[in-house]
Image (cartoon, rainbow, N blue to C red):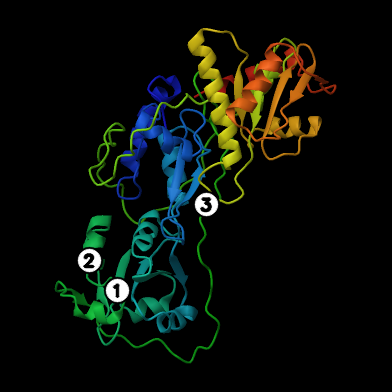
């Protein structure tokens, strides 16, 4: 998610396009211009508060409800590629000699596919393919050291892909190249909701595997459940920024191995071109530009909690309670919309107004503020003046509608209403702020 005027977005563009080429065949890579009126509603629904913002979207078990994760890795092409590969769902069962019979005897309402590999990890390509055929073909991976399984299916080279169509049909060996398109053409012949449907499909002539001794059925040992889990993302803090806010970057995590060499890249999609098969969002009425977000604690302290900083209006936002939740709570969106409209109104009039900022839950400084000021509501609006040592809390008796919020802002602007003193230690000394800023200079995007 980007804006044309965003300098950090322009700096990221070469690495992002290179990542798109590296992920060809593994993931779809897109760019959304959030300055385009037709995209603003979508950007808002995805929780975009600064630019550039990168999110990884992956399928979940609930149709039509994908899981959305904030990308919090480094800003190199390798970092992005590695993170996306690790995020690919793993629907490939790791099978040993002991568990082979149990797996072959279970879930026989679909065809099955076995990847024989000399690697100890499940590669990105086979995970993508298994996810594409989820519910239509069951996938397993067997390592070359599992001699009984290897001999049973007559495997001599690695990787090798074998499909078990089901019924009385013999196992079939895939003899094409290990690219997604070639594998898909082969697997499409056997993918179906039932074995009977699979049997009715015309198939290209394939080479059946030579008959081998059947695996021993005497083994009654429990099936080994060594399902390979993707390594946890060892990413550092996120690096998204809004307007002139500086971003920081951290190294990404290492990638898993794939079963194919890097395929010939394709051009990264033009972010301004919408595919014909994707309906274009309906044009939205004029929407006020979103208020800037203070993603990092250092920025919060520099802008609003330094000894020389003047009045700031801060919207303290909640974190998502569900990993599949794509939007902020309605209360938070209402508060943000009200502040955005008020800020735009004063900007159009040429009037001077103190700055408005949103502070997401991932900003550690938000927790410090909440604890120090004893703020216990999910969404909080506060005015802070560190130089004069006071703060004022918005009491949302009638919600966060524009009229209520604007009346509160006007009262602060005119010096009306009671203010409370900031607790000692909350205002950061100037020297401390400068040291933090210098420490993070090398992390700028």
Identify residue for label 1: 163
Does residue 197 appear anywhere in the picture? yes
Q: Earlier in the sequence, mark 3 or mark 1?
A: 1
Q: Is residue 139 above or below residue 357?
A: below
Q: On the picture, is 23 further left or further right than 308?
A: left
Q: Which mark is residue 148?
A: none
Estimate the spatial distance between the alpha carbons at disc 2 and disc 1, rounded to whole Å.
Answer: 9 Å
Nearer-the-camera pick, 51 or 121: 51
On the image, the x and y values in percent for residue 196 come to 26, 82
- Does the CB distance between marks 2 and 1 fall below 8 Å? yes
Estimate the spatial distance between the alpha carbons at disc 2 and disc 3, rounded to whole Å.
Answer: 33 Å
Q: Is residue 427 above or below residue 158?
A: above
Nearer-the-camera pick, 117 or 104: 104
- Does the CB distance between marks 2 and 3 fall below 8 Å? no
Quarter the N terminus occupies: top left
Identify residue for label 3: 324
Q: Is residue 141 above or below residue 387?
A: below
Identify residue for label 2: 186
Q: Earlier in the sequence, mark 2 or mark 1?
A: 1
């Amino acid at each position: 998610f980007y804006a044309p005027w965003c300098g950090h977005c322009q700096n990221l563009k070469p690495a992002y396009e290179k990542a798109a080429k590296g992920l060809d065949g593994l993931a779809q890579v897109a760019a959304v211009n959030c300055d385009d009126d037709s995209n603003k509603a979508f950007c808002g629904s995805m929780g975009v508060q600064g630019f550039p913002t990168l999110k990884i979207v992956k399928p979940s078990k609930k149709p039509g409800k994908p899981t959305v994760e904030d990308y919090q890795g480094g800003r190199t092409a390798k970092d992005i590629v590695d993170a996306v590969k690790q995020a690919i769902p793993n629907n490939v069962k790791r099978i040993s000699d002991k568990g082979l019979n149990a797996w072959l005897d279970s879930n026989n309402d679909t065809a099955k596919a076995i990847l024989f590999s000399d690697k100890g990890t499940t590669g990105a390509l086979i995970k993508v393919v298994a996810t594409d055929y989820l519910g239509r073909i069951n996938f397993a991976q067997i390592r070359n050291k599992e001699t009984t399984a290897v001999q049973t299916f007559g495997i001599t080279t690695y990787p090798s892909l074998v499909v078990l169509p089901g019924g009385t049909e013999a196992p079939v060996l895939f003899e094409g190249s290990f690219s997604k398109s070639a594998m898909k053409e082969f697997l499409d012949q056997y993918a179906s909701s039932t074995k009977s449907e699979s049997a009715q499909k015309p198939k290209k002539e394939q080479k059946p595997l030579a008959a081998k001794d059947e695996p021993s059925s005497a083994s009654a040992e429990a099936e080994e459940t060594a399902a390979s889990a993707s390594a946890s993302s060892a990413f550092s803090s996120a690096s998204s920024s809004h307007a002139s806010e500086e971003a920081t970057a951290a190294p990404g995590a290492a990638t898993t191995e794939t079963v194919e060499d890097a395929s010939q890249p394709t051009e990264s999609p033009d972010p301004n071109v919408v595919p014909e098969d994707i309906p274009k969002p309906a044009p939205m009425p004029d929407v006020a530009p979103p208020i800037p977000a203070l993603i990092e604690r250092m920025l919060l302290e520099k802008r609003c909690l330094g000894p020389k900083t003047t009045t700031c209006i801060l919207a303290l936002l909640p974190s998502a309670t569900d990993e599949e939740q794509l939007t902020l709570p309605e209360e938070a969106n209402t508060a943000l919309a009200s502040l955005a409209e008020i800020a735009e109104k004063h900007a159009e009039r040429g009037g001077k107004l103190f700055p408005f900022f949103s502070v997401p839950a991932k900003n550690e400084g938000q927790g410090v503020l909440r604890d120090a000021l004893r703020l216990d509501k999910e969404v909080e609006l506060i005015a802070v003046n560190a130089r004069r040592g006071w703060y004022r809390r918005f009491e949302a008796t009638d919600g966060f509608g524009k009229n209520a919020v604007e009346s509160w802002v006007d009262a602060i602007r005119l010096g009306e209403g009671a203010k409370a003193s900031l607790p000692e230690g909350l205002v950061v000394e100037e020297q401390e702020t400068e040291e933090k800023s210098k420490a993070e200079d090398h992390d700028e995007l």
